Image (cartoon, helix red, strand yellow):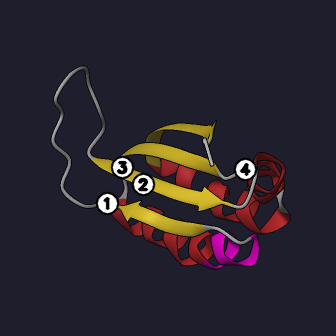
Amino acid sequence: MSAYAIVQVDVNDPSEYARYAELAGPAVAKYGGTFLARGGQVEVMEGTTRARCVIVQFPDMQTAQTFYHSPEYQEALSYALPSSDRDYKFVEGVD
């Protein structure tokens, strides 16, 4: 069953966050992830959000968790966490 990373981000340092993006994309691909949404227009109908929203589909929850804890993604996070405020979660799909 697919799993989805749902990430909402406010970027505080664009140059540092750009380094994160350079590393995160290849890590997502390595673990079978596919970007479904990546920073496009956001329209809030209820509640709140952050400026940038990303949705990544992974083959399953185990793969998503392996990706997140992988050395490749942890290196990317070393640039993202200090340069942004983020909400990051995995949600299991219904397929």
Q: Looking at the image, which residue is at 31% across and 60% down? A: 39
Residue indicated by mark 4: 1
Report the disc number at residue 39: 1
Labels in figure, total: 4
The answer to whether mark 3 and mark 1 are in CB contact below 8 A is yes
Q: What kind of residue is marked 2?
A: Val
Helix, strand or loop at mark 2: strand
Give the quadrant of residue 30: bottom right
For the residue carrying disc 2, how many other residues have a C-alpha within 10 Å: few (<14), some (14-19), or many (20+)? some
The answer to whether mark 3 and mark 4 are in CB contact below 8 A is no
Q: Nearer the viewer, residue 49 or 35?
A: 35
Q: Which residues are magenta?
A: 26-31
Residue 38 image position (x, y, % from top left): 38, 63
Q: What kind of residue is marked 4?
A: Met
Residue 65 image position (x, y, % from top left): 79, 48
Q: Earlier in the sequence, mark 1 or mark 4?
A: 4
Residue indicated by mark 3: 53
Q: Earlier in the sequence, mark 3 or mark 1?
A: 1
Q: What kind of residue is marked 3?
A: Cys
Q: Earlier in the sequence, mark 2 or mark 1?
A: 1
The answer to whether mark 2 and mark 4 are in CB contact below 8 A is no
The answer to whether mark 3 and mark 2 are in CB contact below 8 A is yes
